[in-house]
Structures are given as structure tokens and as C-alpha cells.
Amino acid sequence: MTDSSVHPTSEVAVAVELNGEHVHATIPAHRTLLDMLRDDLGLCGTKRCCAEGECGACSVLLDGELVNSCLVLGAEADGGVLLTIEGLSMDGVTDLQEEFLAAGAVQCGVCIPGQVMAAEQLLQTNPDASRDEIRDVMSGNLCRCASYQRIVEAIQTAAAGRRTDA
Amino acid sequence: MPDENQGHSSNGPVASTDRVVGQRVHRYGGVDRVTGAQRYLSDITFTDAAHVAFATVPVGCAAIDAIDTSPAVAMPGVIAVVHADDLPQPVARFGISHRDRPVIATETVNYHGEPVAAVVAETEDEARAAANAVVIHYTELNGVYGLDAALADGARLVQDPSVRPGDDLNSTNVLEQVEYAWGGVGSEGASSHTIIEDTYTFPMVTHFPIEPGGIVAAPTDDGGIEVYSPVQHPYLLQRTIAEVWSIPLSRVRVIAPDPGGGFGGKQTPRYEPLIAFLALKTGRTCRLVLSLEEAFQMMRRSGCRIHARTGFTEAGELTFHEMRVDFVVGAYADVAPRVMTKGSYVGAGPYRIPRVSINARAVLTNTVPSCAFRGFGAPQVGWATESQLDAGARALGLDSLEVRRRNLVQHDEAFIRGDYEARADGRWHESLEKAAELIGWHEPTPLGRGRGISVGIKPGATTGLSQSLVRLLYDGSAMAYAGTSDMGQGARTLWKQILADELGVDLDLITIISGDTNAVPFDLQTSASRSTVFMGNAVLAACEDIRDRVLELYAEATETPQSELAHSPGQLVTPSGAISLVEAAQTALGGLRGEFVGQGTSRLWGTKGHPLGGDAAFYEFNATAIEVEVDRATGEILLTKHVTVGDVGTEINPLQVVSQDEGAAIMGLGHSLMEQMLFDEHGRILNLGAIDYRIPTFNDVALHMQTASVENHDGPGPYGCKGISEGALLCTAGAVGAAVADAIGTPVRDLPITAERVWRTIRDANRDSPD
């Protein structure tokens, strides 16, 4: 019986800057950042699929880095700056999200918040990414509807739009 | 074949030139999906819900000797621990074609992951911890995990004969078998110049929806129950719960949140009767959220082994085709017998073959019960038939495109003969030629690469019933009630487009209601790419019903003879000219306001005696062409080109057609190149989870990928459409296999065509060569 939840667990206090707001939570020490976001803070835009770091559905930005929130403990995020899909969408649909819709990238939609987070991070860090680079960087985010071509198109169009606006 | 839609002008052109149908309208619900606001089942909050976890045993076949729940009952937060003995006896069994699946494992465990006990606790953590504490004493049995073991003399029976009373086959592991034959194979004489005979295999693969799924059940004050489940068939679930627990349909409310990916895996009830029982027993709202691993243990495609013998004339014309097909269906029937029946019905492909014999069996094994999966048996059998055509072409020194040209049926020509023949409902040569053109078939293949072209066919629904209600409200907004589950295919977007054109209502003013049996009229199911045709026709008919009613009331309100009025999409034509339907509706409704309610039904009865229950309403036809580069030192395959062309009738939303076609095509790469569920000698799934089970990623998509359609407006759905969502997956494997064989000179006959298999094939071919 290795399940940590069988044993009494200590609780930890976590303070993060979440989508621009200071948030406190007291959570079991073994709780993942994903579960903390969904179950303790009620932010269900971050989705859970494999829960072992393979699918990317739970992608969020922690201190500016893209992480699988299922592989990060809530306690590890203490003192950090978090951006989730809710924060990204705070002022409405972004140019990137609009391009996802226009390209037909959204089908069942469960992977899409993670895809948008990964794509936004890509646009921020490599705004001139080639098609091959986009495919490579995005390959940590699975889509079983296989909207891959559509997502690449959305990222390229959004990147072109930002270059024009810049 | 009576069809209540006959008489409706569903194939007629729409008068308006700026119609919304045919445009790239953005997905209904799309904004919620990109912002994370969409609530899938596990995102919905239920006040005071208790949580459920299952206890299982780590083998695929076992006798349950005793269950000690006391350690679990003593755990913190535990409300109830339930196993078979706690249910009404005998434990109910359910299923569509065979009532063989027990509500919870009873006496034996028949596949790895089958729930043996269920824990209800206050929190998810407590439920899981207590499930781990349930002690299940079991004796591992000599389970059958593959075809040979299941079909061997003296093989252990997966299902006790008492589960299949009156069934001639119940002393074997063959659940059902079927034979299709015409022309008399064996009577071909010396007409064959070349005969190809080989065996092909297709792996068990799992749906791997990004939303693994879950169930919530809540007892209601009137003795009924509400069941939340992201299912494709809410009305089948409602019926199952009502029958298993003897509750009137009116008190079983199924709420089906949008499935986060279905692909056939979320059609049939599995654990819902159990969760409903837990809720009724504890009086609590009971919530089960599945892990991806648990989803692997709930849904998969049937694996397949096909032995085929095929004759060709010197010119490459087919003289006969003979197949023996065994589907590995798993521990319970689910819809697998139908997968076997339907997939093997079109097993000989869309070809002109004078003599055919197909013998197919659905074989029980102690593995996850297989279910529907995009393609529904057609990809499995088609893999063998398409590979046989390529082998014939190679043996005869003919071009494989040319061999298909010579054998593919023309429009309205029979490709299935015998008592219940089926004819081509499309101009399929156009799709084949377009695929060849898009990949540049006539251009020389670059050095080190290989090309393959393949065709696939799948029968659409053979019976159906969809009912819809549409309301035109006073302010010019409208609502459609349509029970189709929107699981990614984008059904609601299409209903919106139909309403916009037929009622002349602004797209932004339309709301679609689905996923609640208390609110939405009956729809048989969301499967077989049927909805655009069946529900589409029902929605169209409901809109026409509204126009009739507007005309009648307008006549009454304005004292105009009805004979002087007419309607057309979006308009009422009056003696003084055409006015918008909304304006006419407001005039008709007058000061009391109110609304118009239209009803539409689309029904296909089927044909008695037909092996499929009726001829398909339409066929999905696809041609796929693929080019690969193979690294001969490692066996690794690089997809350089991938094109598919579907015979779609009419594209109601071209954006969604591309999304579905690309998605199906890439999903087809999964079983072709990388996906397979592997079992050990205890029947345990070895690659249980995302780390060990690989599905296509961004990097697996071909360097150049293109999907296209042929539109001849010749389908039975609105504006001449056909269903489209499975086509591009039907013949991916055949095209990949042919391309790899073209590149390395030798075919691989077992899917998936992994680098290891390619490397071994090259090595073995070199070993056999004279030098």
C-alpha cells in the first residue's frame, strides 16, 4: 500500500500570485499543482488527462516556464507566479485563441487550454518559429481529435498578426 | 423503405444566395473551449457529492473466492463498500445485443480492470485509499488472452453457457459468426492468372480520449435518479438504467455533458448501472472520475486476424476474393458482434468481384470488452483486402492505382452481390483520381521513398430515428433541441447553420439544447457518422414545420387566403411581395406574442432479413495516398506526404470537414504505425497509460498533408450531404503498408508497422536473398 493518501499527511500553506492575484491555500503536502488549481482553487480550465506528464492537457505557466501541472507539487509553486488559461483569457478571447477558432483547431476541446498555453509560450519565446520548430515545441501536447495541422496554422497566423501589429 | 422525410425537398437548392450553409462557421461552443470555460463532467461541481473508487485484481481471469471489506469499511470517510453479494440477486446483466455484462464482477473476473468492489467515501483520496484496502481473495484461472488460446480445443470458456442460453455457440468462445458469399468461390476455374494468399493482423487499440470520462449519479425525491455521463447515446443509457433498476423512463434523467472526445468509446453504458445503484443505496450523489488507465480498461477497438486468398487476371482484374476474419472482441459483447457483422459485410471492398466468400467470427477473450471505434470494423478487414490488391499488383508488375481503377465499381454498380446487394451511391472514381493527382502519382517517386494508394468504404447507419424541436421566438431568436452528443464533430454548429438559412435567423441569435433527456426529444444515438444526415433532416423538417405554422397563422391574422401565401427558406411570400419569416412571424403572433414550435422526425426503418438490418443510408468512401521515406538501417519511417479525399455529398461546414478529415487521417496513423495494446501471460495490459502507449503527436503528421472532398450533392442528408467523420481513417493502414512495401521491396503484414517490424522485414529479406 504505497498510496500516500493512506497515511496521515501534513498540510502546507501555499501562497502564489495566480493570474495576477495573491492567493493562499492550505493543501496536503502531496497534492499536485493540477489538483490544487482544480479542486482547491476551483479553476477547472486546466484539464486532467494522463496525470503523468505525457499529454500536456494540464499545461500552465509557472514563473514564465511552461510546466505540466500534474508533475509539480502545489507546495513547489509556493512563492511563484502562475498563469492559467483563465488568466490568459481574462480580457476576453486573445488573438491566438481567435486564430484557433478560425483555423478549425477546436474539436472536442479538452486539450485546447493546454495547447493555447503552450502556443502562447512559444509565441512569447520564439515569435518567428518555423513550422518545424512549432511542431517540435508543441509535440508535448497531445490532441486525440488530431487538430495538429489546424493548431500549427493558428499559431503561424497569430505570429504573423503580431509581427504586423508590432 | 419508408422514410418520414420523403417529400421534403432536402436535396433541393436553397434559394438565398448568401446562405450560411457551406460557410466556414466557427464551432458552436468554441469560445468556451479556447478559454477553459467549457465544463466537462469532471469540471462540474456537485454539492455534497461522495466519491467512488473501484477495487480490482491484477490478472485478466480469476475466480473470486472471498472479499474482505472490513479494512476498507474502517477507513476514514468511508460511506459504503459494495460488491456482488450486496446487489439484488441474481446480479443484473445488461448489453445491447447480449445481456452479458454484470453490473459488477460476479464470481469471476473476466478481464484486467473489471471492478470487483466499489467504495463510496467522502473524498476522492479517501475512496482510493479504501479501495486499496479491500482484500480480494482470488484464484487465477487459465484465461484466454489471444485468438489461438480462445479457439483451441478445450479452451476455457470466457462466458459460462448460462449467460448465453439457447445459443448454439455457447459451448465455444465464438460469440457470433457470419458468412457472406456470392458467385461461388471455387467455381472460377482457370480464370486467375495469379493467386495471392496471406494472413494479416490488426492490433487492439484504445480510444485514448483526452477526457477519460466519469459518471455522477444522484437520487431524486420521487424515487428516480439523475445520471450524468459524457455519453454518445444518452437515450440508450436512460433505457439501460430504467431496465436494470426497474424505474420508469420518466424518472430516469440522463444529463450528458459534451464528451471530451468519443470516437465510439463513449457509446454504451458500462459502470453507470453500478454508480446508480450506489447512489440509490447510499442516498448520496455519487461521483466517479476515471483515470486514463481506467479508460484504457473500458474501451478499445477489436483486434483482427484475416486470412485472405485473392485471384487476379493477368490484367489485374479480380476473379475471386476469399476471407476468414476473426475479431478479438473481449470479455463481453458490447457492440462487437455488430462491428464484426458490419465490418466484414464490406470486407471485399468497393470492387467488382464475381466471386466472394467471407467468413467472420467475433471471438471472446479475457480482455477489455471491445466496442465501437471510428471505422467500426471496416479498417480491420480493409487492411487485408487493400494489402492483397497491392500484393497482386506487385506480382503482376502492374501499377497499384491502375489495379484499383480496373476493379473499383462505377456509380450505381453493385459491389456487394447476392440477396441483399449494395450499390455505389457515389462517383467513387472521382475521389480515387483526385487523391492520385494530389500526391503526384504520375511523377517519379524520389529515391529512397515509396508510395501507396488505397481506398476504403464503410456503411453508414442502416436504421435510425432522430427527433427534433425548433422554437422561433418573438424577437427573432431561435432554439433547436437536438439530442446528438457534440463530442468534437461539431454537430451543433451545423444545426445553427440550418436554422440560420431555413428560418432567416441571425447565427448569433441561435441556441442549441442537447444532452438532457428531460428537455430534448428522443434521438437513437450519435454513431456511424449519422447525425448530419438523420438529425440534420429532423432539424430541417422542424424548420419547415415552423414555416407552415407561420404561414397558417399569418393568413389568419391578416385575413389573407392561405392559397395566396407561400414560404421559402427564411421568407414568407405574400401577395405584396416576400417578407422575412421573422417579420411574418411577429405579424402573425401579434400583441400576445408567444412563439412558434416546429417538430421534425427522421426515421429509417430498415429491411427485414437484411444482414445489417437494412441497406446503409449512405456509404463513406475515401481514397488515401501516402508517401514515405524509410531509413533502411533503423526501419524508421518518415511520412513525407499524406493525402485523403472523401466522397462527402455536400460540405455543410468546410472548416469542420477539414478538421474531421485530418483528425481521422492522423488517428489512422496510430494503428498503422505505433499503437497496440499489449497483454502479458496473466492478461494484464503491459502498456497501461500514456507513457507506454504512444498516439500520434504533432511530429507524426506527414510533412505535407492535405485532405479534400468530392461534392456531387448526392447524399440523403440536408442539401445532399453524407456523413463524413470516419472516412479518412478507413484505408490509412493500406496506404501506409503499400508505401512501406514500395520503399523496402517487401510488405509488412502485421500492424502497427513499427520501426522494429520494418527493420526485421528488411533483415529477413536480405537473409533470404541469394547473395
Image (cartoon, coloured by chain):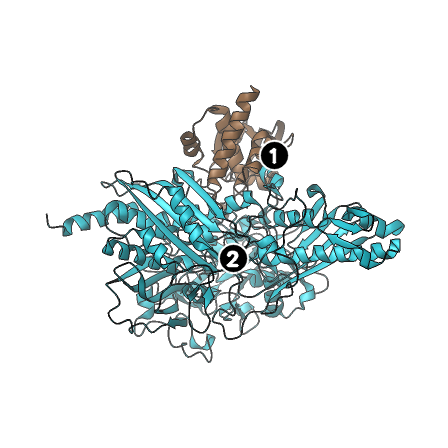
User: Of B460 and A33, which appears nearest the observer?
Assistant: B460
Nearest to the observer: residue B260 or residue A73: B260
* Left or right: where B175 falls relative to B602: left
Q: Is residue A145 visible?
A: yes
Q: Quadrant of the N terminus of chain B?
A: bottom right
Mark 2: which amino acid? Ala
Q: Which residue is mark 1?
A: A86
- Where is residue B762? Give x, y as percent: 21, 47
* Vertical position of residue B100 compared to residue A113: above or below: below
Name chain A's colour. Answer: brown
**Direction from residue B697 to residue B54 in the image, left or right:** right
Could you tell me which chain the residue with mark 1 belongs to? Answer: A
Give the residue type at disc 1: Glu
Q: Where is residue A92, by image quadrant?
A: top right
CA separation in Å, label 2 and label 1? 39 Å
Is the residue marked by circle 1 packed among few (<14), some (14-19), or many (20+) residues within 10 Å?
many
Residue at image position (67%, 66%) is B249
What x and y, as percent, mark residue B104? 51, 65
Horizontal side of residue B577 vs B43, given as left or right? right
Which residue position is annotated with label 2? Answer: B72
- The local secondary structure at tag 1 comes to helix
Same chain for mark 2 and mark 1? The answer is no
Q: Colour of chain B?
A: cyan
**Residue A58 image point, x, y percent:** 51, 39
